[in-house]
Image: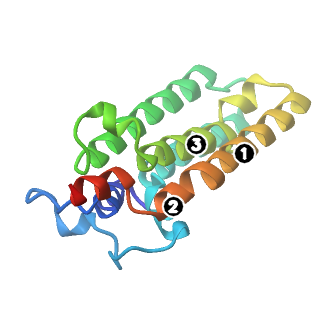
Amino acid sequence: MSLRSLGALARERRNVTQPPAATAAAAAPGGEADGGITALERAVPTEIIAFYTTVIAACVTVNESDSSATFTTFRVAVYVVALIATAWAGGRSARTAVTGWKAVLRTPEWWTAVLSFAGWGAAVPGSFLYVWLDPEVLIVTVATIIASAGLVIAVVLTPRLRVKDPAAQARAVS
């Protein structure tokens, strides 16, 4: 649902108490352990996806009235900046539950946020791919991106989001 709920999800999976500086708004409603789909929803960076989709829609709208105004470089730049912002904001949020940036890079919460945006940003109609690729290649590329991101999220990340972090449980027992 939000990059803000990503940290709460990461803390819940690791039984880490919320830091005093964090606000109550960062926690999603129904904070107890929930099913994988709700955890997945909480790990999707909706703020950045909404920003990116709005900018791309504006590019497409202008392009409809002036076919030479493709804004290819701008579209790529916005995608890269939004991807970096997702990685950074998702990392800061997940960092409230783990120690260090290396640990952040191993969290399914962070990977879900980054992969969700990366897939969406590349495949959404009007993305930079739509101006770079020929129609036949575009269809195959977009289908492959959607299928690949969906497969990794569904098969690898969602099951990990459903369960408590085994490392956190082992530390609690020790």
| Image coords of residue 148 (percent x, y) | 71, 41
Return the disc, 2 or 3, that comes first in the chain's sequence.
2
Of residues 118 and 156, which is closer to you in this image?
Answer: 156
Vertical comparison of 15 with 135: above or below: below
Vertical comparison of 143 with 141: above or below: below
Q: What secondary structure is marked by label 1?
A: helix
Residue at image location 58% in from the left, 42% down from the top? 58
Q: Residue furthest left?
A: 20
Return the disc, 2 or 1, that comes first in the chain's sequence.
2
Q: Which residue is mark 3?
A: 58
Q: Residues within 10 Å of mark 2 (few under 14, many from 20)?
A: many
Q: Residues within 10 Å of mark 1 (few under 14, many from 20)?
A: some
Residue at image location 51% in from the left, 24% down from the top? 77
The amino acid on which the numbered mark 3 sits, given as a three-letter code, is Ala
Q: Nearer the viewer, mark 1 or mark 3?
A: 1
Q: Which residue is mark 2?
A: 40
**C-alpha span from label 2 to label 3:** 29 Å
| Image coords of residue 103 (percent x, y) | 32, 37
Q: Which mark is residue 146?
A: 1
Return the disc, 1 or 3, that comes first in the chain's sequence.
3
Q: Quadrant of the N terminus?
A: bottom left
Of residues 131 and 144, which is closer to you in this image?
Answer: 144
| Image coords of residue 46 (percent x, y) | 46, 55
Q: Quadrant of residue 126?
A: top right
The amino acid on which the numbered mark 1 sits, given as a three-letter code, is Ile
Q: What secondary structure is marked by label 3?
A: helix
Of residues 20 and 89, which is closer to you in this image?
Answer: 20
**C-alpha span from label 2 to label 1:** 16 Å
Q: Nearer the viewer, mark 2 or mark 3?
A: 2
| Image coords of residue 41 (percent x, y) | 50, 63
